[in-house]
Image (cartoon, rainbow, N blue to C red):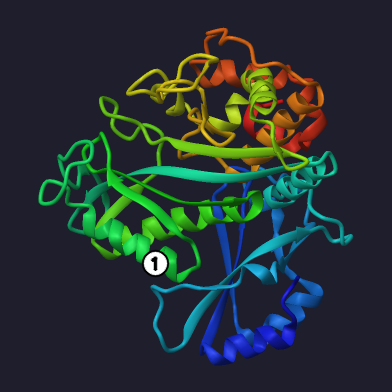
Amino acid sequence: MAITLAELQEYIQDHDVKFIKFSFCDVFGHQRIISVLPSVLPRALEQGIAVDASRIEGFYKPGDRELFLFPDTDTISLLPWRPSHGRVARFYCHLQTEDGEPFAQDGRKILRDAVRYVRKRGLRVNFGAENDFYLFRTGEEGEPTDTPFDSAGFLDEAPEDKGEDVRRDICLTLEEMGIEPQYSQHISGPGQNRIDFAPGPALPCADNVITFRSVVKMMAARNGLWATFSPKPLLEEAGNGFRIAMRPTKDGEPCADAFLAGILQRFLEMQVFFAPQEESYQRLGTFGAPDSLSWADTGRGSLLRRKAGGRIELSAADGAANPYLCFALLLYAGAQGVEQGLALQPASGEPLARSLRKAQARCRESQFLRELLPQEILRAYAGS
């Protein structure tokens, strides 16, 4: 249930909030921010805050038409790294056109529509996320370098693992923002780290991924470092994966096999959304990242892994992926598998696309995607 204006104003007064950030993402999942004063909030709730959509990547709005940001009041959160006096809060926003209609390219809208679609079919899917990132040293002027923060390896501890304190800062900040971290560790690459957080419904989980990326970069900067989720920042080292966990149920009963089969049926068409950069394809097939259409019950090198308790884990996405679009496409593909009663067959081993151009070509040929996504998003990802 949405928080009322009176409740928001009380929250703002109680926490001495002086600035409010209105947040949304472009089609590639890059966060965009407008800061407003609390006095503007009543108007924002009623009329929205106008933005020039023609300057946002992938929105492709013609002429001078504007979009309007309407705060999703349930998502209000304080930014803990801001001062305790004159604090800053943040909303995620809904996007509307000048005609008052939901904006088709809004990733949060696309994911909300996907959640409604599967719910009408008796499906519920919880999502979890496991995010890799590198920490690099910065130069004298604070500019990024290609020098890793440490030379530690998988599950090393301090003093070899120099990222331990940064990860602690990240986890404590996430907790203050209502996100529950579960695991924190150094992983394979020098300066490479991983943190995951508790699973939940699709839209809050996707919001949490965007929050997480922001917190990691902020905490790194406060420690004089540069953080990146880039798919393959060091060519000879492990890439940054974005593992997506799902637990689908149909009328309360697990339906993992059919859901997994649906994803396998559609993944080659959808791959570009999970691996959207040239660099993404340098990661695939290295350091345990998948390179074929495969599933398994054990081992982390398969595209999909079937786990205990009716859970599924996808390992082909990387740190450049837009979580809203990824989660939405997984919901649609998995639901198709359940509706069609697909049986889980032995893995075909068909190769994944190993270049961005090949993945884009498969996307352009997909009737499945044309029926689900706006033309502007398909053009942004696949040039169609």
Q: Position of residue 272 (x, y in %)?
A: 59, 27
Q: Identify the residue at horizontal 38%, vertical 36% (top origin).
A: 240
Q: Say if residue 142 shows up in the picture.
A: no
Amino acid type at circle 1 is: Thr
Residue 9 pos. (x, y %): 66, 88
Report helix, strand or loop for mark 1: helix
At x 59%, y 86%, the residue is 12
Front residue of 276/318: it is 318
Looking at this rendering, what residue extends furthest in the right direction? 99
Q: Is residue 102 above or below residue 86?
A: above
Q: Is residue 31 left or right of residue 319?
A: right
Q: Position of residue 135 (x, y in %)?
A: 27, 48
Residue under numbered circle 1 = 173
- Is 81 situated left or right of 222 in this image? right
Identify the residue at the far left of this view: 159
- Whether residue 241 is visible to the viewer of this picture, yes or no, is yes
Quadrant (top left/top right/bottom left/bottom right) for the C terminus: top right
- The vertical placement of 257 against 92, above or below, is above
Count of residue discs: 1
Q: Nearer the viewer, residue 364 or 340?
A: 340
Residue at image location 81% in from the left, 27% down from the top = 339
